[in-house]
Image (tube, rainbow, N blue to C red):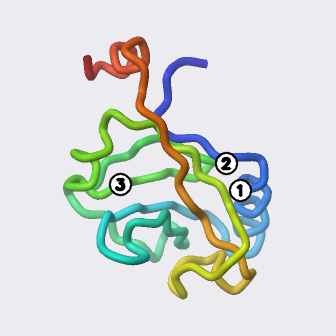
Amino acid sequence: MGATRVQCTEAASAVIEELVRENGELLFHQSGGCCDGSAPMCFPRNEFRLGDRDVLLGEIAGCPFYMGGDQFEYWKHTHLTIDVVPGRGSGFSLEAPRGVRFIVRSRVLTSEELTELGQA
C-alpha cells in the first residue's frame, strides 16, 4: 500500500459514509487553531474554501483530508489516524449533531515512511 500521512479507523469510516450519504461529497480540514481548530473538521466539499497554503495529506473513506500549512510544519513527521468518539466537538463539523466527534491519534513516521514520502 505504501506510506501514507493519514488514515481512519473503521468506526470513523462508518460515520463518514453515513455523512456522505446525507450530505454528498465531503472534505476534512485541520487548521491547528485553538480549541476546535486543532480537531479534524468535516465539511461539505463545495462549502469549504481551501487556502493557498493548505496541504492535502491524503484521503480517508474517499474524502480528501487537508491541513493548514502552518500546522503541517509542526506535523509533517507525523502519521494521523482519524477516529470517532462519543462527545460534542465543534458545532461546525458535520458529525456534531450525532453526539460524536472526530479526533486525531498520531505517531511519528518511520525513517522508511519519510523516505517514501520524499521527506527524508
Identified by mark 2, the residue type is: Ala
In front: 40, or 51?
40
Separation of marks 2 and 1 at Cα, in angstroms:
8 Å
Q: Which of the two discs, 2 and 3, sits closer to the camera?
A: 3
Question: Which residue appears at 70% of the width and 61% of the height?
Answer: 16
Question: Which residue appears at 61% of the width and 19% of the height?
Answer: 1
Looking at the rendered structure, the secondary structure element under dot 1 is helix
Residue 64 x %, y % = 50, 51
Which label is found at residue 85? none
Q: Residue 99 vs residue 93: left or right?
A: right
Looking at the rendered structure, the secondary structure element under dot 3 is strand
Q: Which numbered disc, 2 or 3, marks the residue that appears first in the sequence?
A: 2
Residue underneath mark 3: 67
Residue 63 x %, y % = 58, 53
Crowding near the residue tagged with mark 2, few <14, some 14–19, many ≥20 C-alpha atoms within 10 Å: some
Which label is found at residue 12? 1
Looking at the rendered structure, the secondary structure element under dot 2 is loop
Quadrant (top left, top right, bottom left, bottom right) of the C terminus: top left
In front: 76, or 107?
107
Identified by mark 3, the residue type is: Met
Residue underneath mark 2: 61
Question: Which residue appears at 40% of the width and 61% of the height?
Answer: 30
96 lies above or below 73: below
Q: Residue 2 vs residue 36: left or right?
A: right
Q: Could you say which quadrant of the image residue 115 lies in?
A: top left
Q: Which numbered disc, 3 or 1, marks the residue that appears first in the sequence?
A: 1
Separation of marks 3 and 1 at Cα, in angstroms:
18 Å
Mark 1 and mark 2 in contact (Cβ < 8 Å)? yes
Separation of marks 2 and 3 at Cα, in angstroms:
17 Å
Crowding near the residue tagged with mark 1, few <14, some 14–19, many ≥20 C-alpha atoms within 10 Å: many
Residue 38 x %, y % = 39, 66
